[in-house]
Amino acid sequence: MTLLVISPDYASHLYPLATLGTAWHDAGEQVVVATGPATAGIVRDFGFERVDLRLGRGSNPGVIRAEDQPQGEDDSLRGFFDATRRGAVETLAFQAEARGDDLLWDPVTVARDVQRIVAEVQPDQVIVDHLAFSARLALISAGVHHADVVLGHPSALTVGDEVYGYPPAFPTAIVPDRDALADLHRLCAGVRDSFTAQWNRALEVLAPGSAPSADAFAETGDVVLLNYPGELHDPARTALLPPHAFIGSAVRTEARDEQVETWLCESTEPIAYVSLGSFLSVRSDVLATVAAALRDMDIRVAFALGSTRREDLGELPSSWLVRETLPQVRLLGRSALAVTHGGNNSVTEALTAAVPLLVLPLSTDQFAGAAAIEQAGIGEALDPNAATAEEIAAAAGRLLALDGASRARLERLGADLVRTPGAQRARSLLTGTSV
């Protein structure tokens, strides 16, 4: 049996998708990953085969820097980073305006590449990143049975009257101007229409006579795999989803890191893990505020710098572990608090380890995800552009002292995610085997 995994050339996307593939690999089956060259090392570390597939201009092997991107993509990335400094609505508007080139890049060429790969690999099952729209267009137009994997809050797949790119919820600390929100909604609706027209033009080339889509952002494969705990999702919204399964989390296994193991053994003080992910670690101002907030607390901190320079954070306690990248899964397993932008990997990995979350959302589905965590009582959310060090320290203190019903709910959720890993749930669903 062969599984084909189709992923953008971004580490943050490939890690969970490849982790799902481990259930097939552990069963002695073949796993082939179609992705770009930047993440070839990750594919190799998983022990999978790779076929080359370019799904967009950009790439990210782990920490993204604008200067490492191709011409055009570098300026787009800088524009995105600048937008995050202006606020939530400005960021969402920037992302909406860039959506066509970003998510449906050279669709006919990419689709034909995907169809060629499918013909060569002859997979028994196919899983594909939901945001790989050109790849999904290829599979849909060719009638290839496949599963979409939604890596993010489930609102990354629109249902009902939702408009893609317009969050269905914001955390209480972020209150956008009503007129600005109305403008954003209109913008996202227009982008939806133009994106759908682009999708339909490509679909007509690939499969003439096919029924056009009414909303390309709502298109899915035969089943949707949501890398998210169903317990945290609004039941009313769940009822609107197409055929789906909440697989909980796709937590990867990391290589042993001796420096980290030594650090973990040096003290029994509570640990806070801090990371803004592979993209948003460029926000050195936010990370500096977080560092100032945690500096005088009775905790040790594991601080993933990403693209921020250490000197941008000011003087740091010698007891902190500070590096460009850190083994996130291992450290979350020993942490009492996670400070994060609210990316899907960070959230699901923290929840699997039953770690409360302090979320500083900056883009896309992170706002809805932060609102869900806040509503569940297993974390707090603050505005990354407005929160002071004192406010962050106060929130961190409350979460470190989390107890009662919220602590019990978090521990039940973590135990459930550990008991039945997402990779096993995915394979069971797609192959019809028992977990």
Image (tube, grey):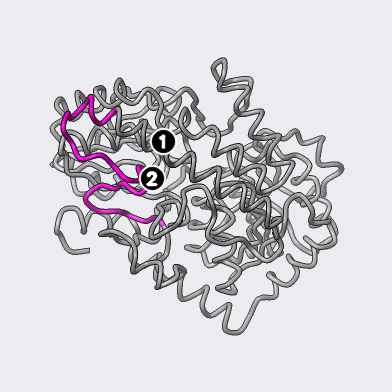
**Contact, mark 1 vs mark 2 (Cβ under 8 Å):** yes
Q: Is residue 19 magenta?
A: no
Q: Amino acid at mark 1?
A: Phe
Q: Determine whether 352 is above or below 74 in the image.
A: below
Quadrant in the picture for residue 239: bottom left
Residue shown at the point (49%, 50%) measured from the top left: 345
Q: Secondary structure at mark 1?
A: helix
- The residues colored magenta run 202-227
Q: Which mark is residue 18?
A: none
Estimate how packed mark 1 is, as few (under 14), some (14 to 19) or many (20 or more) residues with alpha carbons within 10 Å.
many
Pointer 1 or 2: first along the chain: 1
Residue shown at the point (77%, 60%) measured from the top left: 392
Q: CA distance from mark 1 to mark 2?
A: 8 Å
Q: Which mark is residue 217?
A: 2
Quick check: can you spot residue 410? yes
- Report the residue marked by disc 1: 195
Q: Determine whether 214 is above or below 248 in the image.
A: above
